[in-house]
Image (cartoon, coloured by chain):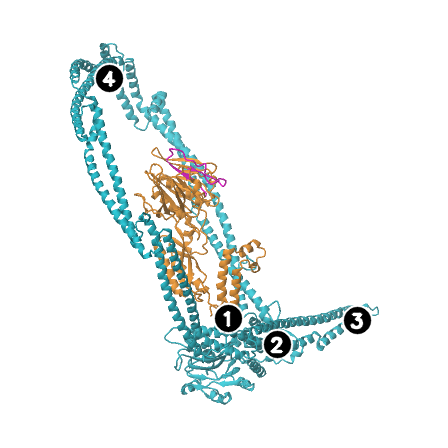
């Protein structure tokens, strides 16, 4: 049963939200006593992808350039800060930290400095490679600090975590291997402390049961997913930063607390310095554009006051009710509205409106479809293309670029979803140009 | 639809103006500038389409007061009606309030008005049915190409907007995004692709910086390793130097220590001092003597106790059964309670038997079965009867309700039938007419369609006849006209002559060599002339053939339309009632019938619904009746099945059930009492038998037979036996304790002796004296060791915590005091050399680390990647926008093809007819080619001329012809609205104005209402000559002064002088009226030049020149 972000649990003393950390969230997992262990805590993250930039932002203000460009590093710093603030015993990295061929010097230097910070506070780092961070490509001239332990991809290696001579945990780790189809090599022995499985890849939670592992630290998923099962937790922290509009909401790591009574609690720790939000409003088509402005401003102020230290990237979606309104649907007004939103709320930190989309109107005026005018012909033509999805669009005819065959194909390609949205937009564009706004 | 009259209550400068009896055909409204013509036109539009913001601001509130708004009287095929439009100035409404009223008094609103206007909105009305002076002026202001283009747009999709304009706008927007050459930076895609390429190069360079960083890191690491090694060497050298210095300080003390160690070694080996314990030896000797006395005393006490225990007597058989006797004794109170309970149960059983007899007798009386056994009746039997009885009762109740409902429904049906009869009689619905509204409506629709079809067929017939007539002309044009034949023949003849003459001069041997080149030249020119003549002839013939084919195609189209229209008419005739010939009269009757039936229909529907409801209720009542009878049969069968008398009523079941319940209660009570009595008697008997058996087992003499008394005797004997047993157990415990103490004291005595022996043997002594000698030797050796310890402590203090004992002592032993000084000098020199090398390497490494820091702190790569991501998103957004535009483009192209295929030919054909009349036959046809967006007109001489090369006046004629054709096209689609023209003939000369008046008058006679407004005297005179009604607008102040408003039909000629003398109205200025018409350009085509072959070039130059001068 996946309980991501919805199961409030008992938070032990000294385990609540820490003000100095980037933001400790709710308890997301809780496994009942399955043994007795020494109490300790660790922080689990994956998919930092330091080399990958934010996607889907076509425009941004100059004051935001550095923030957006280095967002992945700023968020990673929040993660390492959280490890120190929470006084964890060790840190688990489940792959896809950085592609060493593309990360550049900054990524390597950054990781070294952060690992050394953790090492100075006695915090161990256990890192298994993912699909993108092939750790054998780590520059041979640069030694990792002694507190960092890497795991190979060819076999399952073990690492024992001790405190004052007592075994706290044993980590069974292996880097990502595309040929690995099962986790049978992960087999926890007896008297090994708290057994942890560390690897990268998506596995069915049922197949992870029965290996004696109490906590599966996995990576490779976009979104956070914590699955609690009898006797074990399977955890995917997701990316530590939302890089595009598909990755909405808070992002970060998972803080795991192993208690002396055998309780294992997981808690989210938000690390993202830039956050994507999808904000929706529902208004009537008849609403005046100034009234819509007020609604948007209220919502934007609400978000910026709720998250005052966060850089927010917002996709606005306006859902409308009622019949088509020419004034409301004027393309020019939409452009002005987006420009206004960007101008009003683009302070740093603040809210940057990436896009502003309107849903298709519920109804067009009665009679348009049947009238014997160019507009009527156009609406009937659009309806014909809607009804028969096999009717082709010969857009290559308009594309030019005869020497760019692949490019023309990309320019004119439309799958079913895109075709539908393009037809929606074409419908409104046609109505505006054919005098629908004059009637 | 036609305007019959209008009344303006208050609109702009007009107040209380009434214009009545406006003719159905054409009317010219004549008035000087600022007379209020445009206000009148705007009033008509306002009545149709309301008060948009600009009109409200311009014409409201009325200058001279009055209620804002007015009325239009309209005449339609279906009848007359009136549109009243008023504006409440206090209410910010765009359209005002509209009321449509018919002569019959029915009123309706906006929806009805839209239906009357055939869903034509104001933009379409302005673009199709209204032609303004402004449009004529705009056409004149365009250059030739733009004007030709403007005219073409009218033919290829034109209502609210021009389809071509929209397509061009979309193409421009699309080409701004993506050009023919994708990498052309003047287009958005080109710019983005270039930026993307630059960024990729930049990113590659920055990623390569990562490899450089790794190399530097390798160097830095190597330097760090060397530094670490050197620092290690330096530290070792320093340490060695300090050790040598320390060895020099302790050398003397070490010599003393060696002497003391030799004295200690002289004692040899002694037993361990810890083993020689003199005090312990003395203590063991004393304890052994004391222990021997204690053991002897305990032996005497044991003998006395054994004799006392043997003297106490015990009965073992009684003691063995003591627990059973005590257990039976605890049950004596229970035995007494059982005996009391047996007596009570006997009494209860007798009472229950008596009550059972009484209830049985009562049931037999109720059933009337005499002494028959009533035990067959049970609670289950009664329950089954009870369910059947309840069903009968409920069914009876439902039947009663259903009968009531049927009676009420019958009364309602009767009432509605009476009401409907009186309503029909009141409406006068005739016998034999269609009985329902639906049938009447269907008939009216068919009649309306039939009437329209007649008109359409007539129109198509006229077109076909005209085209047939034109066909002859086109066929005749297939043969070359004489003038052209003459030209071609002339050219051919000239070429032939030149050829022959040239050949002669070239080939003849008699000719001089100097003339031969001239001959060759003439030969060539002659050949070219012949070929040119041949090409000219072919060109003429091909054009004629193309024209014929186009014409035949158009005729075929008309013929097919005619055929379809006739076929539809025949199908419609078959569906209409036979014998009807006057379709329009019958249509009016049907529509009248609809109006009457609309009021009755709700009553009929209600009556029909009530009848259906009554039938449903009756069916329901019959069904319930059957259910009641079925339930009664089931009751009787159930009684028979239970062997009960059939006379038993469902109402008796309740009493019978109560008696049966009482009978079963008494039966259960009797059975329970008997069962419990038997159980208690058995328990009493078993307990007494157990007491007797126990007494026999103890083998004591029986003094009593009563079980309770016998049991009491046994209990007393057990109590006396328990006292004896307790005394004996106390003595046995004392003996056991004494025995245990004896063994303990004896073991302690043996242990003391063994300890003494172990003490001597551990020290290696065989006697007590030898043991005491070892102790003395140990004391002497201890004193020497204390002295050695003092020396060591002094050496350790000198070493402190920094030096190892072995290392320093080793140095003293190896080198001696003299060798140590030489070693110390060499070590100091080595340390200096190492410090210099470390300093150099540290400097080099710092430079490398600085470069690494510079590379790793640069966020250029991230910024470039972010920008690349933004560019790619922009390309994606651009792709989506481009796709939208391309899709709109394709859809509109498809619509345009349909327009050009289906509507354009008709429009052009119609326009050709009007153009020919407007130009008095000078231009005969407007046509277009399949490819391209050019309009051509055919001159009477047969030349096809691009519209671009026409004079301004002719272009305006083409424009007017196309607009008239557009109106006709709308009429063919069933939309006929009044046409409003605002001084559209200002640029026409007198002759062409005359033609235009004739065309418009004729156009109006074919069923179109045309309202023309003009301020030009000669124009209204021209129209008057063609019998067109001309109405001169009065001065608005005169209208205001007239009581009840003015009815204006004025002879414009009589009124002209009055209008000229009237001063301008200073208070109110109409913008449009203020515009002065541009100077009328002469038709620049020189008619004389038409006869020349290159006439169009002359016309073109003439048309361009004056405009340049004006510019």
Please name the residue that numbered disc 1 is placed on: B160
Image colour assigned to chain A:
orange
- The residue where tag 2 is placed is B461
Q: What are the residue bounds of the magenta stretch?
A: A172-201
Q: CA distance from mark 4 to mark 3?
A: 165 Å
Helix, strand or loop for disc 1: loop
Assess disc 3: are there few (<14), some (14-19) or many (≥20) residues with their C-alpha within 10 Å of its C-alpha: some
Residue behind mark 3? B500
Q: Quadrant of the N terminus of chain A?
A: top left
Sooner in the amino-acid sequence: mark 3 or mark 1: 1
Label 3: chain letter? B
User: Please, which residue is most extreme toward the right here?
Assistant: B510
Discs 2 and 4 lie in a common subunit: yes
Q: Secondary structure at mark 3?
A: helix
Foreground tag (2 vs 4): 2
Output the letter for the chain in cyan: B
- The residue labelled by disc 4 is B783
């Amino acid at each position: 049963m996946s309980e991501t972000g919805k199961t409030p649990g008992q938070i032990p003393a000294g385990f609540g939200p820490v003000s100095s950390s980037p933001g400790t969230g709710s308890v997301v997992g809780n496994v009942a006593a399955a043994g007795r262990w020494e109490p300790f805590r660790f922080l689990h993250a994956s998919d930092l992808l330091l080399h990958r930039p934010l996607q889907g932002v076509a425009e941004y203000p100059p004051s935001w350039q550095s923030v957006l460009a280095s967002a992945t590093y700023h968020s990673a710093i929040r993660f390492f800060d959280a490890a120190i603030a929470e006084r964890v015993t060790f840190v688990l990295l489940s792959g896809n930290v950085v592609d060493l061929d593309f990360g550049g010097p900054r990524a390597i230097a950054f990781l070294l400095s952060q690992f050394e910070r953790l090492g100075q506070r006695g915090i161990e780092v256990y890192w298994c490679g993912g699909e993108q961070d092939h750790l054998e490509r780590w520059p041979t001239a640069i030694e990792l600090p002694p507190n960092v332990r890497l795991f190979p991809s060819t076999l399952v290696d073990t690492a024992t975590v001790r405190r004052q001579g007592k075994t706290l945990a044993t980590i069974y780790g292996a880097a990502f291997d595309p040929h690995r189809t099962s986790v049978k090599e992960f087999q926890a022995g007896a008297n090994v402390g708290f057994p942890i499985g560390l690897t990268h890849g998506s596995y069915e939670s049922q197949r992870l049961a029965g290996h004696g592992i109490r906590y599966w630290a996995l990576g490779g998923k976009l979104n956070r997913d914590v699955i609690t099962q009898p006797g074990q937790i399977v955890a995917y922290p997701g990316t530590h930063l939302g890089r595009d509009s598909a990755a909405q909401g808070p992002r970060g790591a998972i803080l795991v607390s192993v208690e002396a009574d055998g309780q294992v609690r997981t808690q989210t720790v938000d690390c993202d310095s830039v956050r994507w939000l999808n904000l929706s409003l529902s208004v009537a088509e008849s609403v005046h554009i100034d009234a819509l402005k007020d609604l948007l401003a209220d919502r934007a102020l609400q978000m910026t006051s709720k998250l005052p230290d966060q850089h927010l990237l917002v996709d606005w979606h306006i859902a409308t009710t009622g019949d088509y309104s020419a004034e409301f649907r004027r393309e020019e007004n939409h452009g002005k509205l987006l420009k206004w939103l960007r101008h009003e709320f683009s302070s740093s930190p603040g809210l940057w409106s990436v896009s502003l989309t309107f849903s298709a109107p519920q109804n067009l005026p009665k009679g348009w479809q049947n009238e014997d005018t160019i507009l009527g012909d156009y609406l009937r033509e659009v309806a014909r293309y809607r009804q028969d999805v096999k009717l082709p669009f010969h857009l290559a005819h308009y594309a030019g670029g005869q020497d760019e065959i692949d490019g023309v194909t990309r320019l004119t390609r439309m799958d079913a979803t895109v075709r539908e949205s393009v037809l929606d937009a074409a419908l409104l564009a046609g109505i505006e140009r054919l005098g629908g706004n004059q009637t | 639809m036609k305007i019959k009259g209008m009344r303006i209550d208050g609109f702009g400068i007009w107040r209380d103006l009434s214009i009545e009896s406006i003719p159905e055909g054409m009317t010219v409204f004549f008035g000087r500038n600022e007379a209020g013509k445009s206000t009148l036109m705007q009033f008509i539009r306002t009545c149709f389409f309301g008060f948009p913001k600009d009109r409200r601001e311009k014409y409201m509130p009325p200058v001279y007061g009055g209620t804002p708004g007015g009325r239009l009287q309209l005449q339609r095929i279906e009848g007359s009606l009136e549109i009243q439009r008023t504006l409440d100035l206090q209410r910010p409404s765009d359209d005002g309030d509209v009321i449509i009223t018919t002569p019959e008094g029915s009123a309706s609103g906006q929806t009805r008005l839209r239906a009357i206007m055939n869903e034509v909105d104001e933009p379409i009305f302005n673009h199709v049915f209204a032609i303004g002076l402004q449009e004529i002026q705009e056409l004149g202001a365009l250059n030739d190409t733009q004007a030709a283009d403007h005219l073409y747009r009218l033919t290829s999709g034109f209502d609210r907007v021009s389809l071509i304009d929209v397509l061009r706008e979309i193409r421009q927007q699309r080409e701004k995004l993506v050009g023919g050459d994708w990498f052309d930076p003047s287009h958005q895609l080109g710019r983005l692709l270039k930026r993307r390429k630059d960024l990729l190069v930049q990113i590659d360079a920055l990623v390569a910086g990562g490899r450089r960083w790794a190399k530097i890191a390798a160097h830095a690491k190597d330097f760090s390793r060397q530094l670490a090694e050197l620092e290690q060497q330096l530290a070792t050298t320093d340490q060695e130097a300090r050790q040598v210095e320390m060895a020099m300080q302790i050398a003397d003390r070490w010599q003393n220590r060696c002497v003391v160690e030799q004295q200690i070694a002289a004692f040899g080996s002694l037993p361990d001092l810890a083993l020689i314990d003199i005090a312990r030896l003395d203590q063991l000797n004393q304890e052994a003597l004391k222990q021997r006395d204690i053991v002897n005393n305990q032996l005497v006490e044991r003998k006395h106790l054994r004799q006392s225990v043997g003297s106490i007597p015990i009965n073992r058989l009684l003691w063995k059964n003591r627990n059973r006797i005590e257990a039976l004794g605890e049950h004596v109170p229970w035995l007494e309670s059982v005996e009391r309970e047996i007596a009570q149960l006997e009494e209860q059983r007798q009472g229950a038997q008596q009550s059972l007899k009484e209830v049985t007798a009562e049931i037999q009386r109720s059933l009337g079965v005499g002494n028959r056994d009533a035990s067959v009746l049970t609670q289950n039997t009664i329950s089954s009867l009870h369910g059947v009885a309840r069903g009968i009762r409920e069914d009876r109740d439902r039947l009663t309700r259903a009968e009531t409902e049927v009676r009420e429904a019958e009364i309602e049906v009767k009432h509605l039938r009476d009401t409907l009869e009186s309503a029909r009689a009141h409406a006068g619905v005739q016998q034999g007419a269609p009985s329902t509204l639906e049938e009447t409506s269907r008939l009216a629709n068919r009649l309306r369609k039939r009437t329209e079809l007649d008109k359409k067929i007539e129109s198509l017939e006229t077109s076909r006849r005209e085209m047939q007539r034109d066909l002859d002309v086109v066929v005749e044009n297939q043969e070359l006209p004489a003038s052209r034949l003459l030209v071609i023949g002339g050219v051919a003849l000239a070429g032939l002559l030149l050829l022959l003459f040239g050949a002669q001069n070239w080939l003849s041997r008699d000719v001089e060599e100097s003339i031969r080149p001239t001959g060759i030249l003439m030969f060539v020119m002659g050949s070219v002339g012949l070929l040119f003549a041949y090409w000219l002839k072919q060109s003429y013939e091909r054009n004629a053939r193309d024209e014929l084919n186009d014409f035949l195609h158009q005729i075929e189209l008309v013929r097919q339309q005619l055929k379809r229209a006739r076929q539809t008419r025949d199908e419609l005739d078959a569906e209409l009632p036979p014998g009807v010939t006057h379709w329009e009269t019958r249509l009016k009757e049907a529509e009248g019938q609809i109006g009457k039936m609309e009021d009755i229909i709700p009553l009929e529907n209600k009556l029909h619904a009530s009848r259906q409801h009554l039938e449903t209720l009756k069916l329901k009542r019959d069904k319930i009746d059957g259910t009641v009878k079925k339930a009664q049969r089931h009751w009787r069968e159930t009684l028979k099945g239970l062997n009960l008398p059939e006379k038993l009523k469902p109402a008796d079941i309740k009493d019978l059930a109560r008696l049966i319940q009482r009978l079963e209660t008494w039966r259960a009570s009797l059975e329970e009492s008997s069962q419990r009595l038997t159980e208690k008697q058995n328990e009493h008997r078993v307990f007494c038998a157990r007491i007797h058996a126990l007494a026999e087992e103890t083998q004591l003499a029986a003094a009593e037979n009563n079980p309770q008394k016998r049991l009491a005797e046994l209990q007393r004997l057990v109590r006396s036996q328990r006292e004896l047993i307790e005394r004996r157990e106390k003595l046995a415990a004392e003996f056991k304790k004494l025995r245990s103490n004896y063994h303990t004291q004896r073991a302690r005595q043996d242990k003391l002796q063994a300890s003494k022996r172990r003490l001597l043997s551990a020290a290696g002594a065989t006697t007590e004296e030898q043991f005491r000698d070892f102790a003395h030797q140990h004391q002497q050796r201890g004193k020497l060791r204390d002295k050695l310890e003092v020396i060591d402590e002094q050496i350790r203090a000198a070493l402190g915590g920094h030096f190892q004992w072995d290392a320093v002592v080793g140095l003293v032993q190896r080198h001696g005091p003299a060798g140590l000084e030489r070693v110390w000098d060499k070590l100091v020199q080595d340390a200096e050399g190492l410090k210099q090398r470390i300093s150099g390497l540290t400097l080099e490494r710092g430079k490398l680390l600085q470069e690494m820091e510079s590379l790793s702190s640069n966020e250029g790569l991230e910024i470039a990647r972010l920008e690349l991501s933004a560019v790619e998103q922009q390309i994606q957004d651009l792709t989506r926008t481009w796709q939208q535009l391309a899709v709109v483009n394709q859809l509109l192209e498809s619509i345009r093809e349909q327009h050009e295929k289906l509507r354009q030919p008709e429009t052009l054909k119609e326009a050709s007819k009007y153009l020919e009349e407007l130009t008095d036959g000078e231009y005969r046809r407007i046509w277009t080619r399949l490819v391209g967006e050019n309009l051509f007109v055919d001159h009477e001489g047969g030349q096809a001329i691009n519209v671009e090369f026409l004079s301004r006046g002719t272009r305006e004629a083409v424009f007017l012809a196309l607009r008239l054709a557009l109106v006709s096209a709308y009429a063919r689609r069933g939309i006929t609205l009044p046409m409003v023209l605002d001084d559209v003939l200002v640029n026409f000369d007198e002759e062409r104005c005359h033609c235009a008046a004739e065309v418009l008058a004729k156009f109006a006679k074919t069923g179109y209402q045309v309202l023309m407004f003009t301020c030009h005297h000669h124009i209204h005179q021209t129209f008057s000559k063609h019998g067109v009604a001309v109405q001169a607008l009065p001065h608005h102040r005169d209208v205001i002064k007239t009581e009840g408003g003015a009815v204006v039909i004025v002879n414009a000629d009589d009124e002209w002088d009055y209008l000229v003398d009237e001063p301008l109205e200073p208070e109110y200025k109409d913008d449009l009226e203020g515009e002065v018409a541009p100077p009328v350009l002469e038709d620049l085509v020189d008619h004389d030049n038409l006869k020349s072959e290159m006439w169009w070039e002359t016309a073109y130059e003439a048309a361009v020149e004056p405009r340049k001068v004006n510019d």
